Image (cartoon, coloured by chain):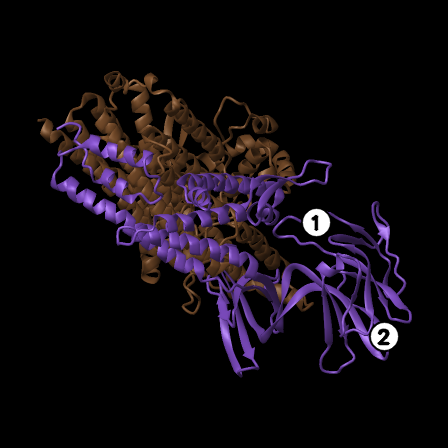
Chain colours: A purple, B brown
Amino acid sequence: MLKPFIRLFSSLKLTVTCLLLGCILVFWGTLAQVHLGLYKAQNEFFRSVFVYWQPAGSGSHIPIFPGGYLIGTVLLINLLTAHVRYYQPGKRKIGIVLIHLGVVLLLTGQMLTDFLSRESNLHLRIGETRNYSEADRAFELAVLDTTGKDSDKVVAIPCSLLVRRGEVSDPGMPFTVRVKTFYANSSLAQQPQPGYDPVKTIAGPGSGIWWRDVPRETEMNRMDMPSAMVEITTPKNSIGTFLVSGWLDRPQQFIYDGHTYELLLRQERFYLPFSLHLIDFRHDKYPGTDIPKNFSSRVRLQNVGNHEDREVLIYMNNPLRYAGETFYQASFDADDHGSVLQVVHNPTWLTPYFSCVLVATGLLIQFLSHLIPFLKRRLAAPGSADVSSADGAVRGSAAGRRDPSSVTALRRVDAGAPGREKK
Amino acid sequence: MKKWIPLILVIVMAGWVLSALHQKPETGFHAREFGKLPVLMNGRFQPFDSVARNSLLQIRTKQSVVQEENGKTQTLTAMEWLLETMMKPESANDLKIFRIDNNEVLALLKLPDNQKYYSLNQIRPQVDELEKQADRIEKIESANRTVFESQLMKLYETLNLYQRLEISLKPPASDDFAAELEAFQKSIGPGMAAVQAREAGQKFDLEAFNTLLGFMGGYDTVARFALPLVIPPVDINVPRNAWQNIGTNLMQTARTGEMNPATKFYAEMVTACRAGQPDDFNRVVGEYRVWLAGRFAPQVQKADQEFLFSTMEPFYKASVIYVLALVLALLSWFNLSDWLRRSAFYLIGLAWVIHTTGLVFRMYLEGRPPVTNLYSSAIFIGWAAVILGMVLEKIYRDGIGCVVASFTGFVTLIIAHNLALSGDTMEMMRAVLDTNFWLATHVVTVTLGYASTFVAGFLAIIYILRGVFTTTLSEPTAKSLARMVYGIVCFATLFSFVGTVLGGIWADQSWGRFWGWDPKENGALLIVLWNATILHARWGGLVRERGLMNLAVFGNIVTSFSWFGVNMLGIGLHSYGFTDAAFKWLILFIGSQVVIILLGLLPQKLWRSFQPRASAQA
């Protein structure tokens, strides 16, 4: 019952098919970046089960090609079943086993990275201190209770909830947020412009502003700026309808039950259990040119939890790894007085390192175990050739056993010293 | 006799290479001596000679200028040209140095289309029009420009470079620069007093004020536009690399009243050159050199070394010897005499030694691992491919390794030569690339992966071409070629995989992600996947000998896409160095590989080589 499946999944034909499909996918996905942009092409080709075709004008998605996840998973199953099927104890195959183990580790590591890793940005001006980083693209609606003197109480509603346009309530808020309109990417205007609608708000600043829905951004270096109209309602009545937008820096304010509340649509925040303070940022150039030589941020790391307090220098190719987060020098302000650190949380970051060592060792063993005997024979007895038997070996093995790691056959081919053409 | 031919050939060629070390003494103006003087440009110390060569390559695509006067042709070296440009611009403006190939650009500038090179004076009447067009085109992203637009921008940029070089040693209006500097120095005292008095609202000496400002107007232009930083700092508290251009230095002199001796030396050189006094010129060059060597010994030494490197022209000489070896090796297949093959092998050995010398010399000059940009990747790919070819030749002794080595060596050096047309090939590394560790590990391994994939592909081409068109592909030869291709593909898999993963790890170190599906990363991944495909297809018996060859030829397409193609997409963090000409060549190359694969797919009865075998089987 299971045998045909195992045979199919462990076959070398499947391996070659997957590799070929992989080649096509990578090539296609690379070319597609010219029009789709890096970010969208990544999601459509590589971080997907299928590549879909959307006929113009229709809303249907037709899968036309396997995506990165599908090819990767089949390749993984293929590799594992092949090893189970053809497993032979002994030293001879140690190279192949190491190579494939490394590839398995790399593939699983990268798939896990796609699901487990989180990237965000930490923008600091010189002299500024922060204990949170901000998402690259995702926004959240922050409802802040600013009545307290020392700290604000925050309820953050992610955009994924706002998209549904329903009502959101939370034990931390004595009222309900009702999303009336939500634009995932928007544009605001001070004056009436073609295609823009007037914002119909009842409370807070926003009246007199015109807005419209715009297509989502696909470029890596541009992001969506969402806007929404939300109504704050209590069981008794409606407090008001407010415009919140990624474009607005100032929060909307209202008072309810003696508390002052603020509404802000801002980039999603991830709080850190420690804080970073930017002491200095340097942008070095080569003398007499504008070619950047180095970017570096000197920061002070303070962790109240364990009383850690020290200075750190973050520069190109030298990130700070601390408490499961890694801080990279990513960008800087045009006036050279501010620095942007990329903050990456990736629990599987070490897998490529191990994988590289495994595969490199495996390939070296495999390669040298063929090359050295071949060279030895070749140099010891040049001219003593038996070409036809070597040829027969590879043909025989190819037709007979389709062993994915048919090293023995290949070894014989390589070992067969060919005759010298002329003396 | 034939026994000695290989040795004689090697000795003759080695003599030719070494002859560059001994040069005839210069007569007249010692341009070569001047060319050894160090300056700071593109962020690095280099001799004036390198400034001249790199600039002329960008402007004229050659390292010399051919000048026709009264029917006689005279050739100027790059340094002689730059000397004239900086010191006697009025006559340099008549030299035909601007290469314009595009007919629409020629029509716009109202120039005749029967020439290849044009002088500044020919272009000058239409300069306003050129600037107007350039202003518009500048706003268009380079990937979206038409051929006319990009060609016009190229001309505009070289024109800009030329005009900046022209004012690098003297202000535009000055004639006797040395005398002018003396007058300037005298005017500083009264002039500055007048400036201060004027600022304080007191009565001031208008003439002294105007004289000083007159000088400073010219120096300000030089300060803003002059390119090489030629004046070293005299203050020992100033960093050693805080060199200035001559204009900035004179503006500083106006404030401090102190004249930098280097400025004086250069002014005397300009005056001597303009007055047609070679003896004076040569004397001042010598004096300045002595003065500088006492203060900036390492910089003078580095400039001397780079000058020697440029005069040796190791890569040019290696490529000539590779061609000679290629011809001999190809002949050896038909003639079957071993002395041809051995001669080729020894010549390749010689060329490789020169190639290696050049490579190591460059590494020493830059203080970097071998591959730092597209140019050096071509040189390194050729270098590695030659080693592989020589190893194959040593093992199989059938001339195939010689052909592979000499051909790839030659072609990659030609590619490198063309890549050098875009400017300084020892440019400084941008921040993220400024790491010798990753340049030495990731870049070198991934480049070795490119080199070996190309070698496998080229062996396969030999198999197909010899098989289809000649009868020289005997069965043992075919078998040994198959073994070579297989072995080299294994080698290529090792290096391309390790190189690609190391690249990912570098990306993880500098950008925080191992893999970002960036075009350059995808290109490297494609090579790994393709090599893995070849190996698995062969193990699975899905392809035999000819199939292996065709797959290996396709490997050439994959590698060329990864090496050059992805840079032309104009996206991603890695995109550097888009060139139109390169695109044309890439398409031609891919087309040629497709034709070869089609040939490889021809039924075996159409192959000339396998006829006897086929009939024997029948």
Chain on which label 2 sits? A
Residue A160 appearing in the image: yes
Label 1, label 2: how far apart the Cα atoms are: 34 Å
Q: Residue at x 16, y 44 (%)?
A: A376
Query: Which x, y percent locates residue A316?
Result: 48, 62
Figure label count: 2
Left or right side of B159 for A230: right
Q: Residue at coordinates 42% horizontally, 49% vertically from top-left?
A: A81
Disc 1 with disc 2 on a shared chain: yes
Q: Residues within 10 Å of mark 1 (few under 14, many from 20)?
A: some
- What residue is disc 2 on? A255
**Marks 1 and 2, the one that precedes in the sequence:** 1
Q: Is mark 1 on a helix, strand or loop?
A: loop
Q: Tell me the quarter of the picture where residue B554 sits.
A: top left
Q: State whether residue B84 appears in this view.
A: no
Q: Which chain contains the residue that carries disc 1?
A: A
Q: Residue A46 carries which label?
A: none
Depth order, front residue of B59/B37: B59
Assign the C terminus of chain A to one quadrant of the image: top left
A230 displayed left or right of A355: right
A82 lies left or right of B190: left
The kind of secondary structure element at disc 2 is strand
Q: In this view, does B376 lie above or below A308?
A: above
Residue closest to the eye, B161 or A69: A69
Residue A175 location, quadrant = bottom right
* Residue that badge 1 annotates: A216
> Residue B458: percent from the left, percent from the top?
33, 33
